[in-house]
Amino acid sequence: MKLPNFPPILLWMVLFVVPVDAYLDLFTSGGDIYRTTDGSTWQLVANAGYADGTAYLVLQGDTSFFLTQSGLLLRSTDQGNSWTPIASYPVSDAVDLIYHESNGYYFLLTQSGDLYRGTQVTNLNLISNLGGTGFVKIVPERLSGGGTPYHYAVTSSGDLYRSTDNGSSWSRISNVGFPNIVALTTQQDTLQVLTYDGNLLRSTNRGASWTLWSTISQVGAASLVADKEGILFLCLETGELAWYRNGSWHWLGTPSQTGVLGMATSGPPTIRYEGDTTHPVDIWKVYPNPGRGLFRLAIPAEYQDKRFTLHGPDGRLIRIQRLLDTNPLLDLRHLPSGTYFLRIGDHTLKVVKD
């Protein structure tokens, strides 16, 4: 079965006006850290040395932190070039690490809802459980008019939880109305949520209700951040980077690698528009994802009749197979639950079997 023709996405060429030492980083499932200061050229800065990374935090100055799912915390004091383990927490499902500047707290969140907090990143204590499961992100609120900011956490199924006392207690306040949530951020007085399928939702009433306001024509969304000026940055698993300006998404450069998990920024840079060219961005999709074993692939036509390799959660090669059309079926029913990686040419797709 052939897919319908999708309109190409315009790739806009821009120029960053960059404060001193301001940069935007991407980090991957393999621990690689890529950096850009202009949005179009990328540098592989380093590899943190761990393949189960889950969060990456950049503070003002040269200090960065890298958190693994197994609770190992690493620190860099040279802008991410070298890394040293500094703490280990008794978790196996860590998902996020943040720093709240206004109150000086670090927060570490697990998928199962355990929340660790402290003023020293090497001494975080378990203070609460949020009361749900499947958490993917925690953020502090940004209030332009002052006041005490709340904290928010979201699950992959769209449940939003809120704390009014710096994380000590939590209540579920809404569901965003879409599944496969991958990111949550605060943009001035607005909460923003991103789904894996490229849907963007926002709330202007502290999470009580949500509106679908944009949909990017790509799947495999991985991360969403907002700078202090309110500019949104979005990236895909395949490395494409975009920013939102004047009512539309503008696609920037890509580090030409895959397995991107998220972004971190030291500024981030402020963007000034310079001009544009056009360039099609390929359509890639695995659905349903997660799924129980049978997955449908949507791939660009030029990849038909190419071979793909399937790798297990540990990187082991499981299968080599030829693609028969642009909408082939992937059967993983005989394999155990876990995260698998499908490699086609220079592209890698993450497939999660429940």
Image (cartoon, helix red, strand yellow):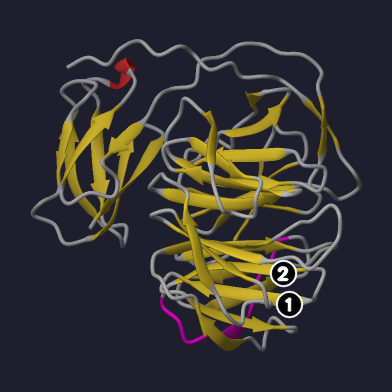
Farthest residue toward the right? Answer: 20
Q: Which mark is residue 105?
A: 1
Q: Where is residue 241 in the image (x, y as percent from the top left)?
A: 61, 35
Q: Where is residue 325 in the image (x, y as percent from the top left)?
A: 19, 20
Q: Position of residue 84 (x, y in %)?
A: 65, 76
Q: In this view, does 312 lie above or below 7?
A: below
The answer, for residue 314, to whether it is visible in the render is yes
Q: Which range is magenta?
A: 80-92
Q: Nearer the viewer, residue 305 or 235?
A: 235
Question: Does the magenta stretch mainly form a helix, a strand or a loop?
Answer: loop
Q: Quadrant of residue 302?
A: top left
The answer for how far apart the CA atoms under marks 2 and 1 are is 6 Å
Query: The residue tagged with tag 2: helix, strand or loop?
Result: strand
Quadrant (top left/top right/bottom left/bottom right) for the N terminus = top left
Looking at the image, residue 207 sits to the left or right of residue 244; the answer is left
In reply to whether residue 252 is colored magenta, the answer given is: no
Q: Are marks 2 and 1 in contact (CB under 8 Å)?
A: yes
Q: Which of 49 and 102 is in front in this view?
A: 102
Q: Which of 166 and 323 is in front in this view?
A: 166
Farthest residue toward the left? Answer: 334
Query: The residue tagged with tag 1: helix, strand or loop?
Result: strand
Q: Earlier in the sequence, mark 2 or mark 1?
A: 2
Q: Tell me which amino acid carries mark 2.
A: Tyr
Q: In this view, does 108 lie above or below 249?
A: below
Q: Tell me which amino acid carries mark 1.
A: Tyr
Q: Where is residue 108 in the image (x, y as percent from the top left)?
A: 58, 75
- Mark 2, Cα crowd under 10 Å, few <14 / some 14-19 / many 20+, is many
Q: Name the residue under label 2.
A: 99
Quadrant (top left/top right/bottom left/bottom right) for the C terminus = bottom left
Looking at the image, residue 60 sits to the left or right of residue 331; the answer is right
Q: Quadrant of residue 342?
A: top left
